[in-house]
Image (cartoon, rainbow, N blue to C red):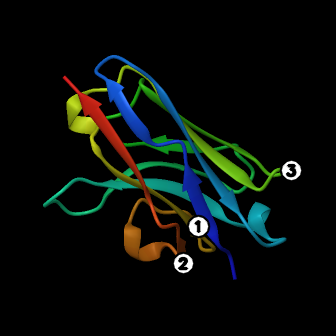
Amino acid sequence: QVQLVESGGGLVQAGGSLRLSCAASGRTFSSYHMGWFRQAQGKEREFVARISWSGGSRYYADSVKGRFTISRDNTKNTVYLQMNSLKPEDTAVYYCAADYGLGSSLPDEYDYWGQGTQVTVSS
């Protein structure tokens, strides 16, 4: 069982930055691939970024590539999402998720989810 708690969301102007954190409980955090997803109002949940259990592999959605960076610290049971050059279209609830499988960009492949943190980017 893994419990995930996101933090770091808020209101920021376009062009600004935010750093999201996701703290995980449990001793097996380093066994999970971790992902960040987002869901804007009225839209489906979409993939943002994911990182392998070791941190050696990272993947990004085209819409955030070059602006967002995913990282993890297995000693702190935490995964991060550094978001730079934010745009109004980045406004959404951001969720972190844990995948005990092979690593995926599909929400259905993830086993555990956090409650989400709101990110609002004003123009």
The residue carrying mark 2 is: 111
Please tell me which residue is depicted at 61% across the width and 66% down the height of the picture: 4
- The amino acid type of the residue labelled 1 equals Ala
Q: Quadrant of the N terminus?
A: bottom right
- The amino acid type of the residue labelled 3 equals Thr
Please tell me which residue is depicted at 33% across the width and 16% down the height of the picture: 15
Q: Quadrant of residue 29?
A: bottom right
Q: List x then y, in percent, for residue 41.
A: 18, 56
Distance CA(mark 1)–CA(mark 2)? 6 Å
Please tell me which residue is depicted at 21% across the width and 63% down the height of the picture: 44
Badge number at residue 82 = none
Q: Is residue 34 left or right of residue 87?
A: right
Q: List x then y, in percent, for residue 60.
A: 43, 41
Q: Is residue 44 left or right of residue 110?
A: left
Distance CA(mark 1)–CA(mark 3)? 16 Å
Q: Is residue 32 left or right of residue 40?
A: right
Secondary structure under the numbered disc 2 in the rendered image: loop
- Ranked by sequence position, the earlier of labels 1 and 2 is 1
Q: Quadrant of the C terminus?
A: top left
Q: Is residue 44 above or below residue 66?
A: below
Secondary structure under the numbered disc 3 in the rendered image: loop
Contact flag, marks 1 and 2 (Cβ < 8 Å) = yes
Residue placed most toward the observer, 43 or 119: 119
- The amino acid type of the residue labelled 2 equals Asp
The residue carrying mark 1 is: 98
Secondary structure under the numbered disc 1 in the rendered image: strand
Q: Is residue 20 left or right of residue 117?
A: right
Can you see residue 62? no
The residue carrying mark 3 is: 75
Looking at the image, which residue sits at the far bottom? 1
